[in-house]
Amino acid sequence: MTRSARLPDVTTEDAFHRVARDESALRPGVDALADSLALPTGRLRRLPNGSLPVYADDHLVLKLFPPPQAAAARVEAAVLEAVSGRLPVPTPAVRAAGSRDGWRYVLMDRLPGQDLSTVWADLTREDRRRVAAQAGALTRALHEVTPPALQDWWPQDWTAFVREQRLSAAGRHHRRGLPPAWSEQVDDFLDRTPLLPGPRVLLHTEIMPANLLAVPDADGRWSLSGLCDAEPAMRGHHEYDLVALAVFLTGGDRTALREALTAYGYDATELDEDLSHRLLAWTLLHRFGDVAAFLEFLPRPDSPTLPALARSWFGLTP
C-alpha cells in the first residue's frame, strides 16, 4: 500500500533551506514517493553532496526539486534526454519525471564510477592531464548537441543576461568577499576584455569533478566514466562552460588546461593571453563565479592585478 506521508510544504527558498538536510521532515514523504514509483525504500540512501535532496540505491537515483526550483527539474530531464547517447561518456537515462506535493522529481539511472572529486587529489599528474583532455572533448561534444526545446528556460535572452551580469559584476564580487583592491579593478578589466561573438550552444555550466565520474583501468589509470547534474544547464557562449573546467578541474595547471582546450578544439595559436583574459572575464560574469572563494585554492599572482590573475589561473603560454 502506498504511504500517505507528504513532502514538506515549502514555498520559498528560505523554507527549503530549513528542511533541506532535515531527514525527519523529508524522509516520510520521500518513502511515499518511492512507494508510488515501486522503488524499494529500504535500499534508498541519501547521497551526501549537493544542494538538492538526492537518494539512490545501487541502480537508480531519485532527485527532488522543491517548488521554488521546479523549473530546474524540467531542465534536468530535458537536457539528459537530449544528450543521451551523444557524448563520449554516459549520462543518466531518465526513467521517470513528475510531481508530488508540489515538488518535482527525476528518477534516473545511477552511473558506474566514483565521484571524481573524491579521487582527484590522488591522481597522478599523467592521469589528471588525460582526464582534463577527456573533459575538454566531452565539453565540445556537449556543445554540439542541439539544445532541447523548453519553454521559459532561463535565461531566455543570453545577451541581456550577460549585460546584467556585466553591470552588477563589481558589486556582486565585492559582496561575496572580494577585497576592494580587487573588486575596484573589475569594471576596467571587463571594459578592456572583449568577448568573442558566437552561437548559443547547450551549456552544462558546471563541468567539474563533483559532477564527473571516473573509473580506473586494470593498470590503475583513471578515465572519465560519466557526467551528471544537468539542472543548471543554460544556452549561451561556449567559453562560459570553460570556467568550471578551468577553475575546478585543471586548477592552475597550465599544461592540463592546454590539454583540455586542445581536446576541445582550440588551435595552438588561439591559446594566448587574450583567451586567458576572456576566461577570467567569464569567471567574473558567471552566475556561480566567486573570485574571492577561488583565491583560497587557486594560485595567487605575483602582483595584485586582474591581468596577473588571468595569467596565474588561466595562463596558456608554455
Image (tube, grey):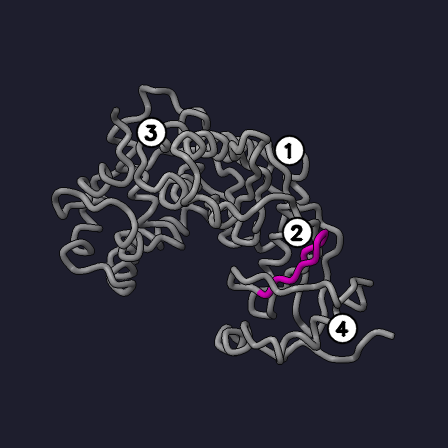
Q: Earlier in the sequence, mark 2 or mark 4?
A: 4
User: Looking at the picture, how far across and down is residue 259, in whole percent?
Assistant: 40, 27
Q: Earlier in the sequence, mark 4 or mark 3?
A: 4
Residue at the image point whose x is 75% and y is 55% from the top: 96
**What amino acid does circle 2 point to?**
Ala
Does residue 207 appear to the left or right of 57 in the view shown?
Answer: left
| SS assignment at label 4 | helix
Q: Which residues are magenta?
A: 53-61
Task: Say what secondary structure mark 3 lies in.
Answer: helix
Q: Is residue 267 magenta?
A: no
* Dot 1 or dot 3, earlier in sequence: 1
Q: Which residue type does callout 3 highlight?
A: Thr
Between the C-alphas of marks 4 and 3, the distance is: 50 Å
Q: Amino acid at mark 1?
A: Arg
Question: Which label was assigned to residue 255?
Answer: 3
Residue under numbered circle 4: 32
* Label 1 to label 3: alpha-carbon separation: 28 Å
Q: Is residue 198 above or below residue 294?
A: above
Q: Residues within 10 Å of mark 1 (few under 14, many from 20)?
A: some
Residue in the image at 60% along x and 44% along y: 113
Foreground tag (2 vs 3)? 3
Nearer the observer: mark 2 or 4; the answer is: 4
For the residue pair 258 and 219, the one nearer the viewer reads as 219
User: Residue at label 2?
Assistant: 77
Q: Nearer the viewer, mark 1 or mark 3?
A: 3
Quote the CA–CA distance across marks 2 and 3: 35 Å
Q: CA distance from mark 1 to mark 4?
A: 34 Å
Q: CA distance from mark 2 to mark 4?
A: 21 Å
Q: Is 8 drawn above or below residue 211 in the view shown?
A: below
Chain-order first, disc 2 or disc 3: 2
Q: Quadrant of residue 313?
A: top left
